Image (cartoon, grey):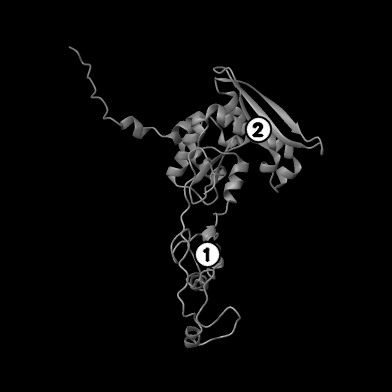
Amino acid sequence: MNTNVTKAPAPAGTQLLQKSVLADMAERFGMEKAAFESTLMRTVMPSNGATNEQVAAFLVVAKHYDLNPFTKEIYAFPAKGGGVQPVVSIDGWLKIINSNPYYDGMEFEDHISEDSGQVTAITCRIYRKDRQRPIVVTEYMAECKRSTDPWRQWPIRMLRHKATIQAARYAFGFANIIDIDEYERIAATVVPINTDVGNRRGSAALRAAIVHEHPGVMSEQETSAATQAEPEDGQQTAASSTDGNQEPAAQSEQQAPTSPPPPPAATSAPAGATTRRRAPPAGGGFGAAN
């Protein structure tokens, strides 16, 4: 008599529910899931905490690139606007570059100014086994250098790191990871000001509101000032004239010429009309005349 009992197949998705990236990473480091999670939250995650979804998203990136968050190969920094931003150290970048099966070496070239003798740029060449020509990227000191301690103390090393990372992006297409210097640049980014605001009374309040840490939050004084716009250029109020003297409206009407004004030229636009720029001709580029 056959006593073997055939088990019914597990419902679809059951194995996915029982498996998590947290459990995978804990198993990778030989830790219990609860102990791994506690260590991760206390030593790697931002001090202001993170949701389960944010922790999972960070671990997915670390697992995908095989980076160790406990050896500082990848960091979990607070993202602008909330969440967690995976930030990879230079050691992490070099690890994922060298572990790529198509990687075939890299070279650096320093560009030195003849006048000052200083390094002005560094070129990085990354070779791939499946391509005949290298990927070449040049980073310039004038564009990359910042007023931070690493850039003041080791400008050439920092520029070499920038050239390495940018060349690696072009060569291998790494996504959703940035380096620490890029993270600091993003955190210091100011929302650009709309130059069409012009010279109006509310411009200062609008600019102040735009660059606030929490956009859209304005004080009562700023709100009042922003809603009071000055007259457009070339316009005057009824109470003033070009020489600063006040004149009654009736007197101004009497001094008006009796003959009708000459007709406007064919090229002049009617009063109050909106001026539109003509698109440049094909092939003219941005420098074409409008």
Label 2 secondary element: strand
Can see residue 92? Answer: no
Q: Nearer the viewer, residue 100 or 212?
A: 212
Relative to 175, say whether 270 is above or below: below
Q: Residue at x 22, y 20 (%)?
A: 6
Can see residue 89? Answer: yes
Whether residues under marks 1 and 2 lie with C-beta atoms below 8 angstroms apart, the answer is no
Relative to 272, say whether 111 is above or below: above
Residue 4 in the figure: left or right of residue 152? left
Q: Nearer the viewer, residue 272 or 126?
A: 272
| Residue 209 in picture, x, y percent from top left | 52, 63
From the image, tell me which residue sits under label 2.
Answer: 138
Relative to 13, say whether 264 is above or below: below
**Amino acid type assigned to the residue bearing label 1 in the image:** Leu
The quarter holding residue 246 reads bottom right
Label 1 secondary element: helix
Q: Mark number for residue 206? A: 1
